[in-house]
Amino acid sequence: MSTVAAVARPASGRPRLWIIRRNATGLAGLVLVVGVVVAAVFAPVIAPHNPVDQDIMNRLAPPVWDSHDWSWILGTDALGRDVLSRIVYGARVSLFIGMTVVAISATVGVTLGLAAGYYGRGLDMALMRLTDVQLAMPTTVLYLAVIAVLGPGLRNLILALGFTGWVEYARLVYGQVLATKHRQFIEAAGALGASDRRVIMKHVVPNIVSSIIIMSSLQLGRKILEAAGLSFLGLGVQPPTPDWGIMVSEGLDSLERAWWVSTLPGLAILVLVLGTNIFGDWLRDYLDPQMRR
């Protein structure tokens, strides 16, 4: 039985994740993330207006606590678009970018890390030198270079972020595989005639999957923040798509007299990234036996 499977349930027989209820910090992070996900899924129900509809007659309308007008709960931007509706729909864009980038990075990085760590044969040296070269380059420069070649846009933004994110997975998985493949139960499986594919999928991967989950949870918030930063610079998602980074950028010109246009989507970014980081930290402490208290 693999290590992960052996500790999948506590002695009481209850699923391990129920213990999150006993950790206020981890639970708070999970609640923040789930809240944003729910808002994104039910955006058509929650949003009071179409996020791209313009109402110039009500441009820069203040939030309800200043105007007492429930037509614009969080106010409007310089084009008269409802800020609440754009924030809610912007959650869809941010989550889609973050999850897609993490999926691409994990798929590429885990595959390369498994191959290099298990087979060696020069693959490990080539992979490590490639990762060293990429890690030596500032990520912002890499983003700008990829987007300069491909052009701005949602698809190219995802490709740029995914192009740099695989390195962390590759190095992590490579080290984990090196530490795992010489364990007795894996060598025994090979001696009994199990194919390399079966050994990797049935014995190696289950013993490193917790590290991959931790890496993904921590990388999700970082990639969402990076995507918002590139959109802020005009290199990511393009208007009129409701994106939090674009919203922050569009509200800078009117920040003194309409603070809500930039501040509220900025707070949305803070909530989502903070939630993913807090939950990721709890997940790391919980799944890593050396850090579990």
Image (cartoon, rainbow, N blue to C red):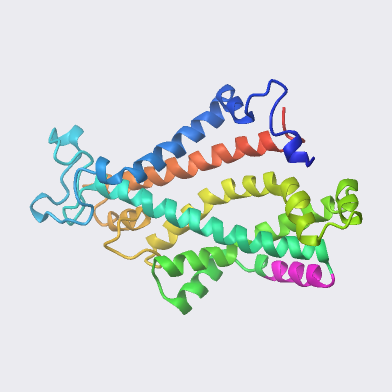
Q: Which residue reaches farthest front?
A: 193
Residue 274 percent location from the top left of the image: 49, 41
The answer to whether residue 75 is above or below residue 189 is above
The extreme left residue here reads: 57
Q: In the rendered view, does 272 fall on the left or right side of 44?
A: right
- Asked whether residue 29 appears in the rendered view, the answer is yes
**Left or right of residue 87, residue 21 in this image:** right
Q: Residue 202: x, y in percent? A: 75, 50
- Region of the chain picked out in magenta, as a range: 121-133
The overriding secondary structure of the stretch rendered in magenta is helix
On screen, residue 29 versus residue 4, left or right, reads: left
Which quarter of the picture shows residue 164? bottom right
In the image shown, does 92 or 165 lie closer to the viewer? 92
Quarter that holds the C terminus:
top right
Q: Residue at x 77, y 56 (%)?
A: 198
Q: Is residue 128 magenta?
A: yes
- The residue shown at (45%, 70%) is 156
248 part of magenta stretch: no
249 relative to 91, above or below: below
Q: How many marks are shown on the rendered structure? A: 0
Q: In the displayed image of the protein, which residue is found farthest to the bottom?
A: 149
Residue 22 location in percent, x, y?
Answer: 58, 22
Q: Is residue 263 visible?
A: no
Going by the image, does 154 lie left or right of 253? Answer: right
Q: Quadrant of residue 10?
A: top right
- Residue 84 position, x and y percent, is 26, 44
Quadrant containing the N terminus is top right
